[in-house]
Amino acid sequence: MKTWFTCKVKYQKQDEQGRVKNVNEAYLADALSFTEAETRIYEEMGQRVLGEFMVTSITKSKIVDVFEYPQGDVFYQVKISYLITDADSGKEKKVTQLMIIHAENVLHAYERIHESLNNMLVTFAVPEIKESPILEVFHHYKEGEERPGAHLTPINDLEKSVEESEDE
């Protein structure tokens, strides 16, 4: 089972009008520990943010699964609940889980969670769907495994190569 960490990052970002403003954004990282999550977020944000940034918090998330789709605009937090029967006592117990799903709107998120969980053996309900502050999800990759986008050149390397070609 994956362990998800919510990482908040503070940095300066330029808006559409060209003004620089401070932003505090949330990202989700799959990691084995807080240290690995911090290392991962510094690695990923170092490629995405020009200038300085600071990781302001890392918390273990209650999210149990993430469903990403290419046509999604926003991540939605979906709460599902279902009943299970305790094998020892025979009593029913309500289980609630949080999941993140990529969708265009709330209705689309509702349809996609049902599509994603259609192989679940129990009947579940969706008591809550809300927009998540998560902007991006960073998955855990094993050593030697090809990462999506590994063929792309980081922005910092592009700037260096441009500067070097201008100096020649």
Image (cartoon, rainbow, N blue to C red):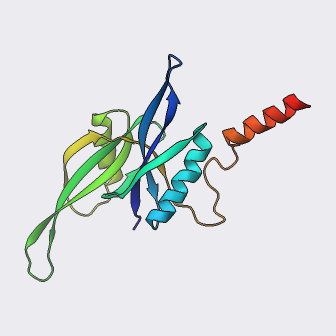
**Left or right: where does residue 125 sit relative to residue 110?**
left
Q: Is residue 16 above or below residue 30?
A: above
Residue visible at 57% across and 39% down in the picture: 49
In the foreground, 32 or 1: 32
Instruction: Please identify the quadrant where the N terminus is shown.
Output: bottom left
In the foreground, 44 or 122: 44
Image quadrant where residue 106 sits: top left
**Left or right: where does residue 122 sit relative to residue 60?**
left
Residue visible at 35% across and 41% down in the picture: 133
**Left or right: where does residue 125 sit relative to residue 135?**
left
Image quadrant where residue 103 sits: top left
Residue visible at 55% across and 52% down in the picture: 42
Q: Give the x, y percent position of residue 54.
A: 49, 46
Q: Is residue 64 above or below residue 9?
A: below
Residue at the far bottom: name it: 88
Q: Give the x, y percent position of residue 22.
A: 45, 32
Q: Give the x, y percent position of residue 7.
A: 42, 51
Q: Give the x, y percent position of residue 159.
A: 73, 35
Whether residue 117 is visible to the viewer of this picture, yes or no, is yes
Residue at the far top: name it: 17
Residue visible at 70% across and 47% down in the picture: 151
